Amino acid sequence: MKELKERILREGKIRGHNEVLKVDSFLNHQMDVAFLQAVGQEFRRRFDGCQVDRVLTIEASGIAVAAFTAQAFDQAPVLFAKKHKTKNIAGDVFLSQVESFTQDKRPYNIFVSKEFLHPGERVLLIDDFLANGSALEGLIDLVHQAGAQVVGAGIVIEKAFQPGGERIRAKGVRVESLARIASMSEETGVVFCD
Ligand code: G4P
C-alpha cells in the first residue's frame, strides 16, 4: 500500500538495527482515522470475495484497524482477544498462551468469551504488526478451539526479517501485509521487500 509505505518513510522512527519501528503518529498512539479507513478498504479489496462473518484481533493496537476493516466488510462484528482477565468477562472462555519476545520472553494468556466465537464461522484476523507471529498463532488457536475457520490474516506492517510471516504462511494461512519490511536501521532507513 503506497500511502502506508510513504508514511513509514516520512514518519517512522527506527530503533536499533532490525529492532523496533515506531509509528506512533498515525497507528500506535495518535491515530489517523482517514488513513485507517483506507487501510480497512485495502483489506476489503485484498480479501474480496471471501465470506467474513467476524473480524478478530488482539488488544490494544489491533482494535482500531480491525474496526475499520469490519466496516469495510459490511459491518461484520469485531472481536478482540483480551490479555488480562477481568471480572466483567462472564462464563466460559477460549484461552491460548502467547510467547512474548518483547516482554522479557514471559508468556501471557489471551482469551475470548465463547459467547462471541462460534463453530463454522469464517474469521478474518487483523493486527497492526507481524513480528515473531506468536500473537497471531494465539488468535489462530482461539479460532480453531471454537471450531471456526480462519479466512486469512490482514497485517498492516510485517517485519519480514523476523520469522512470523513465514511461520504463519507455513501453516497454510493466507497472510496479506500492506507493507513488508526487509530491513531497517537508522543508517539505511526502512527497506521494503517490494
Ligand atoms: P508477535 O506478536 O508478532 O510475536 O510480536 P512480538 O512478540 O515480537 O511483539 C510483541 C508486541 O510488540 C506486539 O504488540 C507487536 O505488535 C509489537 N511489535 C513488534 N514489533 C514492533 C515494532 O517494530 N514496532 C511496533 N510499534 N510494535 C511492534 P502487543 O503486545 O500486541 O501490544 P499492543 O501495542 O498491541 O498493545
Image (cartoon, rainbow, N blue to C red):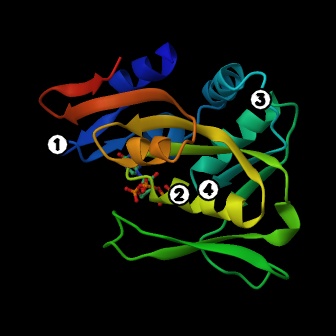
65, 194: nearer the viewer:
194
Residue at the image point whose x is 72% and y is 34% from the top: 69
User: Label 4 to label 2, Cα distance in Å?
Assistant: 5 Å
Image vertical order of residue 4 relative to residue 119, above or below: above
Q: What numbered label is drawn on residue 140? A: 4
SS assignment at label 2: helix
Provide the residue designation for mark 3.
Answer: 50
Which quadrant of the picture is home to ligand 1? bottom left
Which percent across, then down, holds residue 27? 52, 39
Residue 48: % across, % down: 74, 22
Instruction: Residue 72 in the image: state x and y as whole percent.
Output: 79, 28
User: Is disc 1 surrounded by few (<14), some (14 to 19) or many (20+) residues within 10 Å?
Assistant: some
CA separation in Å, label 1 and label 3: 37 Å
Q: Earlier in the sequence, mark 3 or mark 4?
A: 3
Q: CA distance from mark 3 to mark 2?
A: 21 Å
Q: Nearer the viewer, residue 67 or 34?
A: 67
Q: Amino acid at mark 3?
A: Cys
The residue under label 4 is which amino acid type?
Ile
The residues bearing labels 3 and 4 have C-alpha atoms spaced at a distance of 17 Å
Question: Does residue 100 appear left or right of residue 50 in this picture?
Answer: left
Earlier-in-chain disc, 1 versus 4: 1
Kind of residue at disc 2: Glu
Categorize mark 3 by other alpha carbons within 10 Å: few (<14), some (14-19), many (20+): few
Q: Determine contact: label 1, label 4, CB under 8 Å.
A: no
Q: Secondary structure at mark 4?
A: helix
Which residue has dot 1 on it? Answer: 17
Q: Dot 2 surroundings within 10 Å: few (below 14), some, or many (20 or more)? A: some
Q: Nearer the viewer, mark 1 or mark 4?
A: 4
The residue beneath circle 2 is: 137
Distance from mark 1 CB to nearest ligand 1 atom below 8 Å: no
Disc 2 CB within 8 Å of nearest ligand 1 atom:
yes
